[in-house]
Amino acid sequence: MDYHLAQVNIAIARYAYDDPRFAGFVDNLDGVYDLAESTPGFVWCHITVDDDSEAKQVFAEPNLVFNMSVWETQQALRELASAPVAEDSIAARAGQPSETSS
């Protein structure tokens, strides 16, 4: 049986996308997206009309953060999630430095 794994993140951010307090997370997004697209097993990710993977207005909530990607295997997604740039982005979202940050 052939299948793919869809990964979806939906969250309500504490701050607007352009708020300086959210900058640490936002500034890491391009690196995470670039890494995802170059990771073996990556299939597809949601892109908005503006060619921006950060779909700020998928629903009516202005602070809603939404992303979606498709992977060949669970292991491929794990590879991305454990990469330092992804860990930095997660830590920035939480407002704390990651173990990989210097």
Image: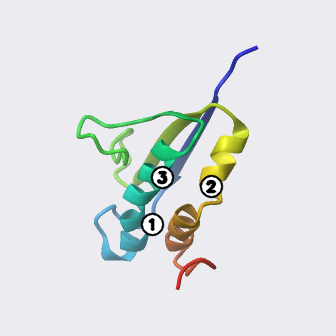
Q: Nearer the viewer, residue 8 or 62?
A: 8
Real-space Cα separation, disc 1 to disc 3, in angstroms: 26 Å
**Mark 3 or 2, nearer chain start:** 3
Query: The residue tagged with tag 3: helix, strand or loop?
Result: helix
Query: The residue tagged with tag 2: helix, strand or loop?
Result: helix
Which image quarter: residue 70? top right
The spot of residue 17 in percent (x, y) is 33, 61
Amino acid carrying mark 2 in the image: Ala
Residue located beneath label 2 in the image: 81
Q: Residue at x 60, y 61 (%)?
A: 83
Residue located beneath label 3 in the image: 35
Q: Residue at x 68, y 49 (%)?
A: 78
Nearer the camera: disc 1 or disc 3:
3
Amino acid carrying mark 3 in the image: Leu
The spot of residue 40 in percent (x, y) is 58, 40
Query: The residue tagged with tag 1: helix, strand or loop?
Result: loop
Crowd rating for badge 1 (residues with CA inside 10 Å; few <14, some 14–19, many 20+): few
Q: Nearer the viewer, residue 70 or 16?
A: 70
Q: Are marks 3 and 2 in contact (CB under 8 Å)?
A: no
Q: Residue at x 52, y 47 (%)?
A: 10
In the rendered view, tell whether residue 78 sits above or below residue 100. above
Q: Are marks 1 and 3 in contact (CB under 8 Å)?
A: no
Determine whether, in the image, residue 9 is placed left or right of residue 19.
right
In the rendered view, tell whether residue 49 sits above or below residue 99. above
Crowd rating for badge 3 (residues with CA inside 10 Å; few <14, some 14–19, many 20+): some
Residue located beneath label 1 in the image: 14
